[in-house]
Amino acid sequence: MQKTLPIHFAPLQGYTDVIYRNAHAACFGGIDTYYTPFVRLEKGSFRHRDVRGIEPENNQVSHLIPQLIAPTAEKAEKILSLFIEKGYKEADINMGCPFPILAKRHNGSGILPYPEEVQALLSLITKYPQISFSIKMRLGWEDPEECLKLAPIINELPLRQVAMHPRLGKQQYKGEVDLKAFEAFQHVCKHPLIYNGDINRVEDIHRIQEQFPGLAGIMIGRGLLANPALALEYAENRTLTPDEMSERIRDMHNQLFSCYNEQLQGGETQLMNKMKCFWEYLLPEADKKLRKAIHKSSRIDKFQQAVNLLLKNLQ
């Protein structure tokens, strides 16, 4: 029988904010480690929502690691100083973000074709022995050989783990994951390795475990947005009943609605737009007409009515 691997909730900008993480942990759980969406410098300072999102008193998950994104060690160090100020002893460095607007400035996966820049950025790690670092990366920006060229640099660093999403940055989330390229990287990577990419069902986790023995964990992003119970079902080796799923999603939805209503100042429209984000990935196999009704709602009462109808239809 396969051992149960730790499940890491991949951060997704615009989705897995502090309110979402707290609601997911309270209503579903099954997660070993949550990560903040990356914190970055914008015109030399921090975005308010990024700072609010990492405040320890705002977070109610059992294990949270803040993530930073930067093209240089100097910028990364400024962000790291914020993490240290807030009391964190762990930090994750993002070398996987595929968004072109950031990548063209050598942030995220945009830095992967430049080994000297990667080495300079990651030199930060040896300067802060009191911090336990991990990195999240892709195979490369436009060539899967890029990660293999970076392996000697990465292997020399005192990293806790490496999370690898086996796509190229230029693919964003399109096309297939390249499992052969992942295997090639696993052979040369000396650090504990976490697999990330296209995990949508418990069967996918078991398949990846079987294909790549020795993994240190599984990281899931969009798959958990679609099925928030995925990690719980894997950990407990059971499938939630339709009634239980409906009840837990309702609880999570209510918690999100209440917290966003309290936080957002833009009135009904802003609140509804934020709540509709929750439904972008959620339950993709649910009735299409009911999902469409949620997204077409122009008033809160109509929105709530559509959500109630969809959740009732699940049972």
Image (cartoon, rainbow, N blue to C red):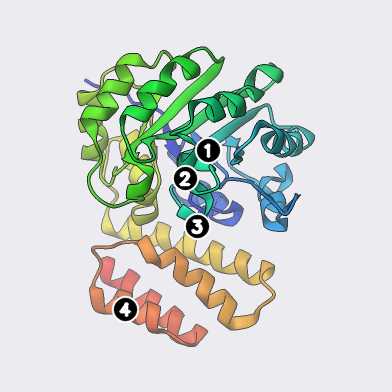
- The crowding category of the residue bearing disc 1, from other C-alpha atoms within 10 Å (few below 14, some 14 to 19, many at least 20), is many
Q: Give above or below for 139 relative to 150.
A: below
Q: CA distance from mark 1 to mark 3?
A: 17 Å
237 versus 312 height, above or below = above
Position of the C terminus, as image quadrant, is bottom left
Q: CA distance from mark 2 to mark 3?
A: 15 Å
> Do the CB atoms of the residues marked 2 and 1 lie less than 8 Å apart?
yes
Question: Which residue occupies 75% across, 50% down?
Answer: 44
For the residue marked with disc 2, what is the amino acid? Cys
Report the residue marked by disc 4: 292
**Residue of label 1:** 94
| Residue occupied by mark 3 | 15
Q: Amino acid at mark 4?
A: Lys
Asked whether residue 40 appears in the rendered view, the answer is: yes
Q: Quadrant of residue 255?
A: bottom right
Q: Secondary structure at mark 4?
A: helix
Instruction: Tell whether 241 sits left or right of 220.
Output: left
Q: Determine whether label 1 and label 3 are within 8 Å by CB.
A: no
Determine whether 210 is above or below 40 in the image.
above
Q: Which residue is mark 2?
A: 97
As rendered, which of 131 and 27 lies closer to the eye?
Answer: 131
